[in-house]
Image (cartoon, rainbow, N blue to C red):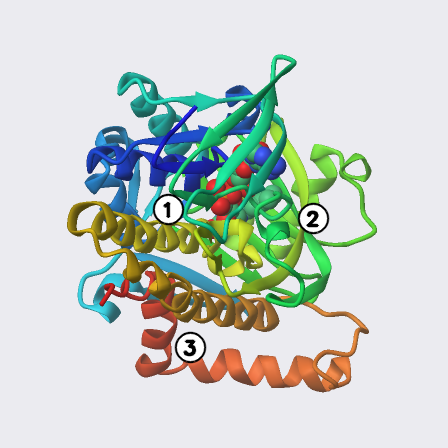
Amino acid sequence: MKTQVAIIGAGPSGLLLGQLLAKQGIDNVIVERVSGEYVLGRIRAGVLEQGMVDLLREAGVSERMDREGEVHTGVELAFNDKRVRIALDELTGGDTVMVYGQTEVTRDLMDARKEAGLTTVYEASNVQLHDVKTDAPYVTFEKDGEQVRLECDYIAGCDGFHGVSRQTIPDEVKTEHERVYPFGWLGLLSDTKPCHEELIYCKTDRGFALASMRSPTRSRYYIQVPLTDKVEDWSDDAFWTELKRRLPADVAATMETGPSIEKSIAPLRSFVCEPMQYGNMFLVGDAAHIVPPTGAKGLNLAASDVATLYKIMTRVYKDGDKDCVMQYSEICLRRVWHGERFSWWMTNMMHDFGEVEVNGTDSQTFSRFMESELNFYTDNEQGRRVIAMQYVGLPYEDIK
Ligand SMILES: Cc1cc2nc3c(=O)[nH]c(=O)nc-3n(C[C@H](O)[C@H](O)[C@H](O)COP(=O)(O)OP(=O)(O)OC[C@H]3O[C@@H](n4cnc5c(N)ncnc54)[C@H](O)[C@@H]3O)c2cc1C
């Protein structure tokens, strides 16, 4: 097999990149470890920044999102019996976010790919990347018991945190920065009316909670839990009872509850791999970086990496400017670190770290610092603007 860009992984990064490249006439093949149904079964992100919304429109896959997605002009922070609304549009000069599930984005991209007749190899095993430092890299994998070799000009490693692409960068070339948080998020998805029209991030003495949604009839809720908890420890009833204790009382009082359709625990991690490229192989999305979900940045950072690589590949194939690939890592990392910092900051401010020492500070002192931080940034318009401009997403950087 031969293509111009071999894409490893059919998550949102791989599928969106493939769609954008195909629109520019750049041939690509996606190689994915699991089945398409398995990919669609993962319940993950749901808040799309303006930049990602625009990119999905550019990719020609926005029809359903524009019809069914919900534009949100604000989010709320609840703490110490206060509720502070961050008016995203007013504070940023008109920017908003779109609530539309990652599953739906993925489904739209898969449908578009199928319709365009583009090749995706699902259930490929033993995927390996070769000669990525040369002008003739290739990928090998097994499919239905056969060994396949895919030759290409470039490889996009869109294979998530546990993928193979990052492992092809030698240890002496890469630096991995990591922080693992001492708690996780227990998430519950249910076909119930959302308890509020906007997301509410809640800091309480019992721990963090988030009231979120996927549609007017589907809710997504999260509560902070110890890392030692297992999903089986939490019945639906126990979840709803604990959630109500953490939400503002008036919201909890009228909240609709119902059976879960999905329940899972996600550990929280900040992670960045530098550089994000090695020769003609580029890391995209979760393959290069992970954020705790507190700032709703994971999927959105993946989209900005895709935007950068798409612009670079277009320049390479349209103008023959091969040197421009050298900009990829630097451009991506500037935005990635902003997203990492914002997610880390929101996580520190909104969670209960219990008795754990944080950043060399005892837990009680750290907690008082964070309380002050939260009050400082929410009590005045400039502070709320700082939150709003990061929540809607910083602008994408152009290539030189
Ligand atoms: C439980 C959970 C909850 C989350 N919640 C949020 C949220 O609320 N908000 C938010 O913004 N973000 C959230 N995220 C993050 C967001 O989902 C990710 O940032 C996003 O999925 C990144 O997309 P990706 O395509 O880069 O990686 P992925 O979605 O991980 O896709 C990678 C793909 O590569 C495939 N793959 C892996 N290894 C190989 C291999 N060896 N060969 C071939 N294919 C391979 C995988 O099967 C997968 O399909 C969450 C993540 C998790 C895990």
Three-letter code, disc 2: Glu
For the residues labelled 3 and 1, the Cα–Cα distance comes to: 20 Å
Q: Is mark 3 within 8 Å of ligand 1?
A: no
For the point 65% across and 84% down, the residue is 368
**Which residue is tagged 1?**
197
Indicate yes or no: mark 2 CB to ligand 1 under 8 Å. Answer: no
Classify mark 2: helix, strand or loop.
helix
Name the mark on residue 378. Answer: 3
What amino acid is at disc 3? Thr
Q: Are marks 1 and 2 in contact (CB under 8 Å)?
A: no
Crowd band around label 1 with a 10 angstrom C-alpha radius: few (<14), some (14–19), many (20+): some
Give the residue at x 59% y 80%.
370
Q: What type is the residue that disc 1 sits on?
A: Glu
Residue 19: horizontal and vertical position, in percent?
30, 34
Quarter of the image with the C terminus is: bottom left
Q: Is residue 350 visible?
A: yes
Disc marking residue 158 = none
Estimate the x, y position of residue 233 in percent, counting from the top left.
82, 39
